[in-house]
Image (cartoon, rainbow, N blue to C red):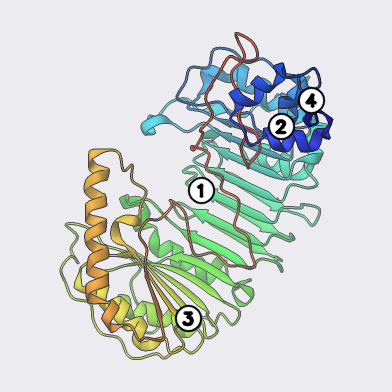
Amino acid sequence: MDRISELPHEILGSILSLLPLKEAVATSVLSRHLRYAWAWSTLTLDFDPEETLIDFKYHSRTLQNKKSHRACFDLDRRFTSSIDKWIEFALKKRVQVLVLDFVKEYGVNKDSYMFPRKLLGLEEGFASRHCVGLKSLKVLSLNFIDVTGEILEHFLSMCPFLERLSVSFVEKLVNLRVVGPSIALKYLKLDECDDLKRVEISNTNLLSFIHTGTAIDLRLSNVPSLVEVAITSQNNDIASLCASTAFMRLAFTQLSCCLYQLETLMINTQEAEYNKDYTFPILPNLKHLELTVEGDYKLSLNQLSFFMKASPYLQRLALKLRFWEHHSNEGKKIKKAAKCPHHYIKVVEVFGYCGRTNAVEHVMFLMENVVALEKLVIVPYWSWDCHHSGSESGKRERKKEAKERRHANMHLKNRVPSTVEFVVVVDLECNRITTTEDIPPIPEPELGDLRGEMTKLLHPNVVGWDRSDEGWFI
């Protein structure tokens, strides 16, 4: 007797979801009841960007209950018509998560896809049929897309449940206003948007604001819930370095209205001159500080000391060291700093550690002054950035990384008190590992990690389906 066919659809779907797509579809020949059972298991539509997209067909039986939609391809404006259909389809299905990631392969500059204004009813004569779908949207992530502030503000005003907005490497975004108590947004991330000039956030319940890139005109007012802020830069170019002083000004001027309430602060101080006469404002509620410094800057320890004094109740410190080859400070020994005992920091993470004397000096300074230290984490120099381990340069960098790990174990481990847990990271994912436990970071799904194989199981022109924990991909 076929007892499997008697199982409820939900259980069958869960079982078949554990199988590779091809095997799940193959079960359709076992019995009449199992003919479409594989469709119940499909929560992810995954197109492999390394394959050729021949055509796209909508399969309503499979997709009607989808809660998320992702388009992850090396696509540009030439594919506008198809992309418009994907987005329209997603809105029609009332998705909760919409992710569009059209990464530019090898950083090649080309015409990016422009998010369609007409699809949102923003063009005269084009009343959107699917604006109702915006009512369900909770997460919106746009990467390598041309999008304007008008479009983003429309999403904010029309999506009553939109809590997370992540915008990365977009063009055409110059100004953005997040204003009004009716806006549900809790997490806002703006990452390397080169055209961005001004951001205004006012009268909202925003919890987290993360900005990576060159300095902007940031205007904050009446943001009582804002507890996490990042003002930093990840690029190594000259423009980013020159903007670092501006980042410092942002931290203590434009952020002045919320400094007292911040629990997490991430800031870049590279190239920022130390001024002993400057009085740092006290950050009484700061629990987690992520500080990027130039490792060879002669007064780097003094800067670090100032931040520690300004954060009397800090519990977690992530120090990110940057060392530049052929820099004017290279090889110069940094100056000692006066002792500044801190009694609340329990975890210290040092990113960018290498065998240089100045790197060791930073670690020793922290060990001497962090009185209640419980855990010390060392992240080797070459783990700082993301590298493709399969390439020749990646292999060389991995060797250097292994060398720095050995150096840390040889020169630091025996100096760490037995009461302190000492960890040297072997490998590091390409993201931040120091996050607050009580404030979830903006979700950054691994958009490039698409494993599904494009198949033609459903129709000669229909590409394959594959499961993922994150939702379904296009």
Q: Quadrant of the N terminus?
A: top right
Tag 4 or tag 2, which sits nearer the N-term?
Answer: 2
Q: Which residue is mark 3?
A: 280
The CA span between labels 2 and 4 is 31 Å
Residue 190, position in %: x, y? 55, 49
The CA span between labels 4 and 3 is 51 Å
- Residue at image point 80% right, 28% down: 5
Would you say 339 lies left or right of 16 here? left
**Amino acid type, residue under disc 1 in the picture:** Asp
The CA span between labels 3 and 1 is 27 Å
Query: Is residue 455 visible to us here?
Result: yes
Q: Which residue is mark 1?
A: 191
Tell me: residue 438, above or below residue 169: below
- Residue at image point 74% right, 47% down: 162
**Amino acid type, residue under disc 4 in the picture:** Ser
SS at circle 1:
strand
Query: Is residue 275 visible to us here?
Result: no
Give the image quarter of residue 373: bottom left
The CA span between labels 1 and 2 is 35 Å
User: Could you tell me if the residues under marks 1 and 4 are in contact, i.e. CB atoms within 8 Å?
Assistant: no
Tag 1 or tag 3, which sits nearer the N-term?
Answer: 1
**Mark drawn on residue 273:** none
**Amino acid type, residue under disc 3 in the picture:** Phe
**Mark drawn on residue 41:** 2
Tag 4 or tag 1, which sits nearer the N-term?
Answer: 4
User: Could you tell me if the residues under marks 4 and 3 are in contact, i.e. CB atoms within 8 Å?
Assistant: no
